[in-house]
Image (cartoon, grey):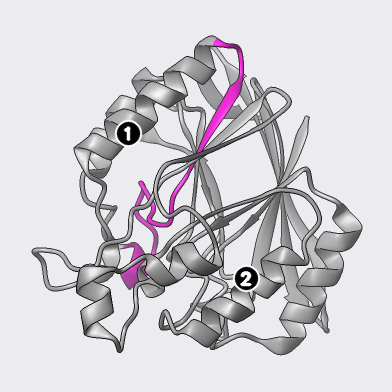
């Protein structure tokens, strides 16, 4: 099985410094094969916030796959936000669009669901273009046909969550679920709502597992302390251990195991 640390909503610029120290120590001890960060690496998209996020990621052992979140487009520099929203992200962190990382028999595909603006009042919910959905689905199908476990990583959830941030799924999310389900994607790793959860997605008849990470470092907690997930993944089995911050340390809190049976994920 491949060990994946799933972090999200780091919000450098508004971090809990004690949690930052503890997270770095815990990840060093855990030695994951891959670290996935599902967006909102910064609070406001400032240069100093990106520099801090980049320094943290650089110090991690092993490969990192990160995708942008809605907070990673500059908030206060509107010219940059509207004309080059991901230039700071790409300078400090890496590619902002379609990515792929292979670790043994597990493939993780990263896509950008954040937008500089949208045709709705709340821009924070994000949107996926059909072109990007189809590109990611085609890549997933190729990896699935090669016998790999395929995970999709994006910032915005494809299922709703019990708070305001989770009251809507990402734009074109229904279409994404349809295409990802057809293409053999087995789990989606997301963030945004600052609450951790794992469940089979009913709209895919349980064929795709939703793995939602809480905020790993931010002081902007929404009813749950800072946390992150440690997944052990292979094609027919995923185990998620949630680590929660308390008393200056991240400690394992809950363990959930799902087995792929008859084409659907079921708790073991």
Across and down, in percent, residue 248 comes to 82, 83
**Secondary element type, mark 2:** helix
Q: Is residue 264 visible?
A: yes
Q: Is residue 56 left or right of residue 149?
A: right
Instruction: Name the residue that disc number 2 marks.
Output: 54
Structural distance between the alpha carbons of marks 1 and 2: 31 Å
**216 left or right, relative to 154:** right
Q: What residue appears at the point 36 percent right and 27 percent down from the top-left corner?
A: 137
Q: Callout 1: 10 Å neighbours few (<14), some, many (20+)?
A: many
Residue 250 lies in quadrant: bottom right
Residue 45 in percent (x, y) is at 42, 79
Contact check, label 1 and label 2, Cβ < 8 Å: no
Residue toward you, 141 or 49: 49
Give the extent of the magenta segment: 146-166
Above or below — where is 74 with respect to 104? Answer: below
Q: On the image, numbered disc 1 is attached to which residue?
A: 177
User: Is residue 158 located in the magenta-colored stretch of the structure?
Assistant: yes
């Amino acid at each position: 099985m491949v060990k994946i640390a799933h972090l999200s909503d780091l919000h450098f610029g508004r971090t809990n410094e004690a949690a930052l120290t503890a997270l770095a120590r815990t990840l060093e001890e855990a030695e994951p094969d891959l670290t996935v960060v599902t967006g909102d690496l910064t609070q406001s998209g400032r240069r100093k916030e990106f520099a801090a996020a980049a320094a943290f990621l650089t110090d991690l052992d092993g490969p990192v796959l990160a995708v942008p979140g809605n907070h990673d487009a500059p908030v206060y520099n509107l010219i940059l936000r509207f004309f080059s929203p991901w230039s700071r992200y790409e300078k400090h962190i890496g590619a902002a669009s379609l990515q792929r990382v292979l670790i043994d028999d597990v493939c993780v595909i990263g896509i950008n669901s954040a937008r500089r603006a949208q045709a709705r009042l709340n821009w924070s919910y994000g949107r996926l273009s059909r072109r990007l959905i189809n590109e990611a689905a085609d890549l997933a199908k190729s990896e699935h046909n090669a016998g790999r476990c395929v995970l999709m990583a994006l910032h915005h959830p494809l299922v709703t969550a019990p708070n305001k941030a989770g009251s809507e799924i990402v734009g074109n999310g229904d279409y994404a679920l349809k295409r990802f389900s057809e293409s053999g994607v087995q789990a989606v790793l997301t963030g945004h709502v600052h609450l951790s959860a794992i469940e089979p997605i009913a709209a895919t008849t349980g064929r795709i597992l939703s793995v939602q990470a809480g905020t790993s470092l931010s002081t902007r907690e929404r009813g749950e302390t800072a946390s992150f997930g440690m997944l052990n993944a292979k094609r027919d089995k995923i185990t998620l251990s949630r680590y929660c911050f308390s008393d200056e340390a991240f400690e394992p809190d809950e363990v959930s195991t799902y087995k792929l049976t008859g084409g659907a994920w079921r708790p073991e």
